[in-house]
Structure formats: structure tokens, C-alpha cells
Amino acid sequence: MLMRSMFFCGLLLAGAQASAMTIYKSTDANGVVSYSDRPSKGAQVFTFRDRMVEHLERQVYLVISKKKGADSVYVRNDLYAPVEIELSFSGLQNVNGAPSRPIRRVMPARSSIRLALLTAANADRPLAYVPKFEYSLGDPSGAALAYQYPYPWRGGPFRLSQGNNGQYSHFGPKNRYAMDIAMPEGTPIIAARGGVVVKTENAQNGRGNDPAGNFVRVLHDDGTMGVYLHLKQGSVSVREGQRVSVGSPLALSGNTGNSSGPHLHFVVQRNTGLGLVSIPYQFKQPMGVLPNFALGKQ
């Protein structure tokens, strides 16, 4: 990890102007790892892999209250953000009141709603059914407002290490338009847009159990969400439900989760219908890019 960190720092200091570069990783007889832009016998291409699959704990769930032959089916949303939910039932036996079609609606933040009241067709027999429940963060209605993001950090200048549609981790709906900015651990990370803190993770050390590492998710007023990932353990300084403004301190940059070197992964997402997707965004200022230190193009 030390060698890898030194490698990234070296790239930052060098500020090389090449638009693409393949880096080779080799290990000598003494076990010393080195990196070079020239292949050598036994060397392997160093591939930058950084899957960004943020894991959100279940804070939206079904609550079924049973009383005198009737089941009241509620959904509870404990998040500081609206959620879109869908509920349906199958395997119905001795049940009245089950909807014929899936129930889909948007629940406000911190709310509980009864969606169905199921009663026994025959009071002498128990109800039997299987609920199917899905949800996604955010409200899919409305449109994202045009906005240019100031840099979400203090210090620099830093460079882009993986951009939109990067082949190493920036593919798939949730991360297609994410940006990775290489920077030393401990760089102050600040809010690039005002909003409400929806979710944080602060306890991961190193790779941990969540590929996203430590992170902060902020819900913006237009329904989009900015997510700041791979933050330093114990550095998150905001709490869920707190409102932040542009420039508010959030945390320090780190190298946690599925990260191959110190950097900030910043992505803007929105719900487009029971699913989060990343959306394109721009920084207010232009940014240079690091050499491409893995096979392929940025």
C-alpha cells in the first residue's frame, strides 16, 4: 500500500502532460514492487480498479401489524430523503383487500404510510400471502436544474485520474458520469452544492466491507444527490439530517473501500424510476488529467 501511495503521489508531483500511459508493475527477487512506463520481463500491466457500488443500509422497510384477522401493511422511511417504493402481493390465500396491481408511490422523508389493509375472507382460517417490496432513494418527478459544481475540496491543484465512462469502474448506471480526482489523504472535502445530508459512513478502515469506503451523500433541492466517496476513517464531520451549504466541511479525503490509491470519487445521481443513475455534471473550472496509468483510455 505504501508503494502504491507513493506511486500516486509521484504522479501528482510530476504533473505529466501525456494523455495516455500504460504502467507496468513488477516484483523483483526480494519482493520489492516497482512501477514503470516501460515493460520488463515478467511485468504485468497495473490495472486501476475502483468499483463504486455504494451500499446503503436498509432504512426503508415493511411493518405489518396483525390484529383480529386483519393485517395492516405499512412502509416506514427512516431516511432524510424521499424514497420511491413499490409493493405487491403474491401467493394470496384467504385474503381480501390485496391490490390487483403493484402500489407505487413516493414517500416523504421520515414518514410512515399504510398501503394496504388485508382481511381474512374466512375468519376461521389464517391469511397467507407473500409481499414483494422494492424502493429507491429519491423522487423521480421533476427535472435536474442546470448547475456547475465548484471543486468539492480545498487545496490543489489536483488532476483527474478517471473520468466519465472510465473502463475501470465508471461504467453501469450508477457511476457512468463519476469523476475520480487523485489527491493526498487528508485533503479537506467540502460541499459542492447545498442540501441535506442523507447518509454517511465513517468507520471503515482500509478496504473494509463496503466498496464505497467512507462516504457522504447529500440531497440537493432539485432532487439530485451528490456523493463523496473513499473518505478518511473518522473524518466525516456532518450528521444525517444536517443541512449544508456550498463550502461546508464534510470530511477529509482518504483511500478507503475499493480504492487503488488516495483520491476522491465524486458522482451526482438521481432516481429515474425505482433506480439511481449517475447524471452528467461539470465543474466550474477546467481540470487537467493524470497520465492514464492502466491499459485503455480514460
Image (cartoon, grey):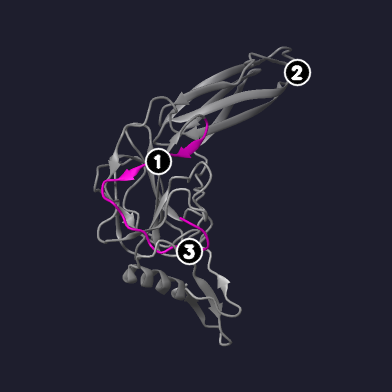
SS majority, magenta? loop
Asked if the residue at tag 1 contacts the one at tag 2, i.e. Cβ–Cβ closer than 8 Å, the answer is no
Which of the marked residues, 2 or 1, is nearer the chain's N terminus?
2
Q: CA distance from mark 2 to mark 1?
A: 55 Å
Which of the marked residues, 3 or 1, is nearer the chain's N terminus?
3
Which of the marked residues, 2 or 3, is nearer the chain's N terminus?
2
Residue behind mark 3: 260
Vertical comparison of 30 with 54: above or below: below
Residue behind mark 2: 125
Residue behind mark 1: 280
Asked if the residue at tag 1 contacts the one at tag 3, i.e. Cβ–Cβ closer than 8 Å, the answer is no
Q: CA distance from mark 2 to mark 3?
A: 58 Å
Q: At x 59% / y 17%, what residue is drawn?
A: 117
**Badge 2: how crowded within 10 Å, few (<14), some, or many (20+)?**
few
Region of the chain picked out in magenta, as a range? 274-298
**Any part of residue 233 in sight:** no
Picture coordinates of residue 200 (x, y %)? 40, 48
